[in-house]
Image: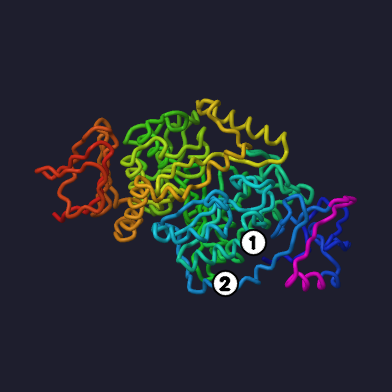
Amino acid sequence: MGHPPFEVWAPRARAMTLLADGVRYPMHQSTAGHWQLNDAPAGELKCRARDHDIDYGYLIDDDATPLPDPRSRRQPDGVHALSRTFNPAKHSWGDAAWTGRSVTGCVIYELHIGTFTPEGTLHAALGRLDHLVELGVDFVELLPVNAFNGTHNWGYDGVLWYAVHELYGGPRGYQEFVDACHQRSLGVIQDVVYNHLGPSGNYLPRFGPYLGSDANTWGASVNLDGPGSDQVRRYILDNARMWLADYHVDGLRLDAVHALVDRRATTLLEELAAETDTLSVQLRRPLSLIAESDLNDPRLITSRQAGGIGLSAQWSDDFHHAMHANLTGDTTGYYADFAGLDALAKVLTRGFFHDGTYSSFRGRHHGRPIDTMRTATSRLVVFDQDHDQIGNRAEGDRLSACLDSGQLTIAAAFTILSPFTPMLFMGEEWAASTPWQFFTSHPEPDLAEATAAGRLTEFARMGWDPQRVPDPQDPESFTRSILDWSEREQPHHAQMLAVYRTLCRIRRNYPDLTAPRFALSSVQYDNAAGWLVLRRGAIVIAANFAAVQATLPLGPLASTLLAVGTVQATSDAAYRLGGHACLVGIAALA
């Protein structure tokens, strides 16, 4: 990591004392606000920490209560308590055969450790990895796991970015999880949040200028461009390196990069991309960076040599919105612009819908066109459901709550067989009936009340009934969101699981589906009749979004790979598809 243990950056402190296992050690300031121990106690503690746990914290100025280490690896008693040393080198890795893979073009599976299993731990999640292998996914993407106050939440309120939440299994459990994934040829992507800190347990401002003067949706922005920002950026860059090197993670999903306030000539994202590329060479395995971005800006995935940021991939919310609006008929809020199959057709062939077009939700023009001649389709991550798009609905309801099996198949087919990098959300593969609601466990009553009020305000803007919004602090909002794995044995859920397994197998077996060229895709659709056909080389994906029968001019098919619903060939090489029917086939040679 390049950061000595028992050294802390605290330019705002006038005095600093290390409290380690009940013993006080005075510290002295070296350069640029860094505090360190004298050589003798430093050597003794570093040697002891290699093999033994040390509980420690920092006393700033005349404080009587020690604060946790900003770079703490463990918080066994919560984010307000002492830190505990952790030596990542003590884990004996068993993933030597894992050479890694680039995330682009692969199938990603997004999951939340706390609700993926009833136990809500990394160890319990190990018991479900074989299910993911059988499903056919390539990467597991974990929602944030860093330490937060309370027992359960989504993970986006973290305050100690270097520590793995203890109730999930802590850093040792995290290493064991990644190791087990790699031994099953599953890559791991970690969701990280660098745009804000949680509201409880954030002691970083006591140490230094970690927060800037700007604000975003979640509070004060992180100081990326003001005085002291060199060290704040180093704090973030070292954190990214920790996941990729110490924990063998294969990639990072960067939360809401549009909320990063960064006016420096070389942005944090550029630095992160450059350092990750260098680390990839050192570790001799591919490392990926995926941006969640609301900007529809292709410069994020344009190479640095061509003047871009140089990230591996970015999310395309437009794909989700077009799929959701056309399947559900929901045109409220930001879905308004996506009604009609022409919106979905544009997304499938050009990547973004808003590529400089007017966004009615924003009240302005939005986005920038993708250079489809030079950009790989696989640099866009797409999904028909994810934690945000489910959890930020009033009741946290999944598509399975309002769509039939045919419509769910259509969503799955266009997501998994799309030209892009598909991502699934845990449980969607068997049409899970459990919702995924917004849940928190803030111990502070004022914070709990403010969180609930903020949710109601957000939903009012979307036009949703506030009476339908569950209280995030109600423990039932959390327990309702835990997956019910027994559902997989029920006929309807088992059928959907079989469909998902088939689609993942088709994607893996037919190279046309993963060829990263926009030009390979062509789309036919009829808005009035409600059908759309996507062709990727010889592969044909056809769907009737309407509830009534439609005739689609597909031409002759050499074989059918998947058919759900009523599908009938006609004498003129057209196909009649019943309402909500879906067909995947191989076109006959001319």
Judge whether 354 appears above or below 59 on screen.
above
Residue beneath disc 2: 93
- Along the horizontal axis of the image, is 287 left or right of 420? right
Whole-percent x, y for residue 221 in the image: 66, 43
Disc sitting over residue 88 in the figure: none
Observer-nearest residue: 285 or 476? Answer: 476
Residue at point 45%, 39% (across, down): 398
Residue at point 50%, 31% (across, down): 362
Residue beneath disc 1: 171
Observer-nearest residue: 43 or 28? Answer: 43
In which quadrant will I find the N terminus? bottom right
Observer-nearest residue: 383 or 475? Answer: 475
Q: Is residue 456 visible?
A: yes
- Along the horizontal axis of the image, is 13 left or right of 336? right
Q: Is residue 262 visible?
A: no
What secondary structure is marked by label 1? helix
